[in-house]
Amino acid sequence: MQETKKWRNYSNHLYFYHPKCFPNLIFVKIMEISKTYSPAEIEDKWYSHWMENKYFHSEPDGREPYTIVIPPPNVTGVLHMGHMLNNTIQDVLIRRARMMGKNACWVPGTDHASISTEAKVVGMLREMGIKKSSLTRDQFLEYAWQWKEKYGGIILSQLKKLGASCDWERTSFTMDPGYYSDVIDVFIELYKRGFIYRGLRMINWDPEAKTALSNEEVFYKDVISKLYYVKYKIKDSEQFITVATTRPETILGDSAICVHPEDERYAKFVGKTAIVPMINREIPIIADAYVEKDFGTGALKVTPAHDENDYELGKKHQLQVIDTFNDDGTLNANAQLFVGLDRFVARKKVVALLEEIGQLEKVEDLKNSVGYSERTNAVVEKKLSMQWFVSMKEISGPALENVLNGNIRLHPNKFINTYKHWMENVRDWCISRQLWWGHRIPAWYNENGDFVVAKTQVQAEKLFKEKNIAYKNIRQDDDVLDTWASSWLWPISVFDGLKNPEGEITYYYPTNTLVTAPEILFFWVARMVIAGYIFEDDKPFSDVYLTGIVRDKQRRKMSKSLGNSPDPLDLIELYGADAVRLGMLLCSPAGNDIIFDEKLIEQGRNFNNKIWNAMRLIKGWEIVDGDNKNNAVAIKWFDAKLNNTIKTVNTHFDDFRISDALMEMYSCIWDDFCSWYLEFIKPEFGKPIDKRTYDITVAFFDRILKMLHPVMPFITEEIYHILQERMGDIIVADYPIASEINTDALQQGEMAKDVISKIRDVRAKNSISPKESLNLFIMGDKTRFAHVDFVISKLGNISAFEQTTSDIENVISFISGGQTFYLPVNKKIDIDQEKAKLQEQITYQKGFLMSVEKKLSNEKFVAGAPDQVIDIERKKKADAEEKIRMLELSLQKLG
RNA sequence: GGGAGCAUAGCUCAGUUGGUUUAGAGCAUCUGCCUUACAAGCAGAGGGUCCUUGGUUCGAAUCCAAGUGUUCCCACCA
């Protein structure tokens, strides 16, 4: 780096030293606004200001509402990149709606997340040396609430750093007293209506912890197991049938052998009786298409008590259910053999015994996946137990219908197929969970196992009494409800819709947009829709915007365990919230995964800086009265350009194409406003700007800031106030709408840009300094080239001549907008290279012309294509011919 | 095993009911620049077998079929 200039930054004032300009000074203070944008204090300042002015708060009034309910993050959660993306999008939507004059209401809150919270509390207790099993339910819940008060909701305060304009006065929690009671009321209501029932279900059992596990608490591992081939004797015969099993110890609980009905090998056995080895129990041989002919031997042993499919099979064929295990995983009396031994010890003994009696045919290795308990790492056992279910088929009709008919729109709509498939094959929803943290199921049992469903013990006793059933020592169900059985009421309960149906729910419901991840489309979104139609008789939201998953550069999902996720708060501190918001949005079209790269955030920061410097430029000008007419063309062009951008941006937003809207703004601001417009109107250094141009430029900047505010709230608010002193804040300013677009001005500006770029290219390629004057010649009719004035005034050192014939030496030509331009240069140009360049273009144009001519000479095309298309082709042909003519002329000239 | 999606520049993606050129953007790359708003910058350039093979059509990146690759969801793995 040459030592001609030095910059110094002393206490935010920038000092500048230049030996030519200021030979006698060391440093000169030139400006009090710092050269780079520093977000930290600015962000805190404006967030507090917005809060003080209650801009985020909403009460029903005469305006049209725009409502978003936040997907409540786990109360235990900390902010991760997924939240950043998701909440940035919500904030963009809500801020834009607010500026559009709507009553914007964004309801924040958290989800009690029964499983993960309970796991965290259990973990904390373990560290304190307390076992969950040593506590009563109430003691445990007390710890859980303490934990929630201490650590819960950190995530919400983190969202503030991002700039989220939630109505914090409305913060909700799925276990708030009112919410809790809604969940219970809904259970009772659905039970009364017959949509909730009790049924047997195979659940996951952890024999070590002696507790049931929910599906989410089981993790599967691929392991190499042994597949044992065991011979079962056919009764009254010397024949055997061989089955393959990975769990020989469950042979003791077999109730049938099953083969495929079309399996010829075994047809002769169907209907006969087989004899269980070792214990000699007689079991039937049945046929069912469930069995795969190609697996193992094609014959399956059926153990209804210890396998879900076998249970279903058992139900279908009315087989005996023989439970051979105790709760701790040891064999019970039903097994007859090896009673009291652990299941894995028993397995070895069974195998040894089978071998001894000659009924073990062979053993093979088999790769299969085995479920383990997340809590104890024990192999999970399947166990039959009574659970609560919601009949989904009967209540999900409207939820499917209203997505298919477009009443609820999914963005992107490719998810409709997935949604449809799920809804059409919906299975009953098991809503009981074997946990303590959550909404306790309002069912009460007497000593005989009779039950009633009631909110309180008193009401339950009353119900028992009415039914004339004994109700001494009744006790409440131990289980709690699935988390989704509370969060499906979220858009209703946060507005107290169940208890106060005539209240503000009538104003805010249905909400407008839900922003969430596709992975919970069924778990949560579909269920909210179902609940909406049951309890409010209306959809919960009109649009669902599905975001992608945030992944790292290797496309791995970002997760704590992989340690591949940056801490969002660190990013905000380093780059500023606006930069992070922009960076996240830049690469996240709806429904697509986003590959996170810190470079994107850097790009966001650079964009902030660009805008900041545009402001510095404008603020640095001295203003004099007047109107510099030279700027008129640029002003007209940029006005058209900006209106066009605003129009496009608004269309993209309305279509939920947020990253497209963003890119449109980005290039309009960076390229058109900064690189073209400001460069054009910028007075020479040290000279003042005329007031008219200044005022118009500030007005342009104003509209740009407003357009950008939803995406980058902090910097826009700051510059909005630096630019002009004013009363109002940008957060509640009117969102810009496009006025009429002067398409002529727009087109001419774009053409002029193209010519200028091409001239710059000529300079770059021929090493001609920007300071060197050039003449510009135009072949043909100058009136066809109205934007030439723009080019001339922009470049200053270029003159245009109308040229009909020419014998200029050392000329370089280029084409723009169907017009040929000539630049005579003082340098010796490489004629062969110029010729080759021209020849290349001619070849291209001729090829193009051929393809057009081929189309036009095709009778079927002329007959079949619409007139409009044919006209376009004819015009293309004429244009290409003209271009070729021009190029050939240029080529001739080179000799 | 059932279902859905995706495949376009080195990367991430647009490409609107098939027709505005022989396909666009951002990033990355390359070249030249300390130029009084910004080197976190400016100016310019290069880069594509639109996965493959068929089909429909006057016309296919776009519609259809098959294949290949890939991702996700659900169920399960005797």
Image (spheres, coloured by chain):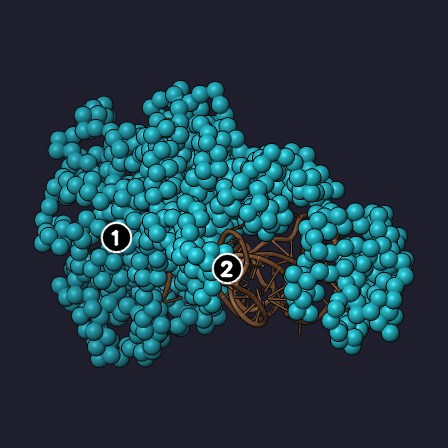
Chain colours: A cyan, B brown
Determine which quarter of the picture holds residue A26. Answer: bottom left
Residue A317 vs residue A128: left or right?
Answer: right
**Where does label 1 land, which residue?**
A213
Residue B63: give x, y in percent of width and height: 68, 55
- Mark 1: give few (<14), some (14-19) or many (20+) Cα within 10 Å: many
Left or right side of A114 for A425: right
Q: Position of residue A783 (x, y in %)?
A: 84, 48
Amino acid beneath label 2 = Lys
**Element assignment for label 2:** loop
Residue A732 lies, in percent from the top left, at 46, 30
Residue assigned mark 2: A20
Quadrant, the C terminus of chain A: bottom right
Q: Nearer the viewer, residue A681 or A490?
A: A681
Q: Which one is nearer the viewer's eye here, A476 or A100?
A: A100
Q: Under tag 1, what secondary structure?
A: strand
Disc 1 to disc 2, C-alpha distance: 78 Å
Q: Is residue A233 above or below residue A746?
A: below
Q: Is residue A866 visible?
A: no
Kind of residue indicated by mark 1: Leu
Mark nearer the viewer, 1 or 2: 2
Q: Is residue A623 left or right of residue A73?
A: right
Provide the chain ID for the residue under circle 1.
Answer: A
Residue A871 falls left or right of residue A632: right
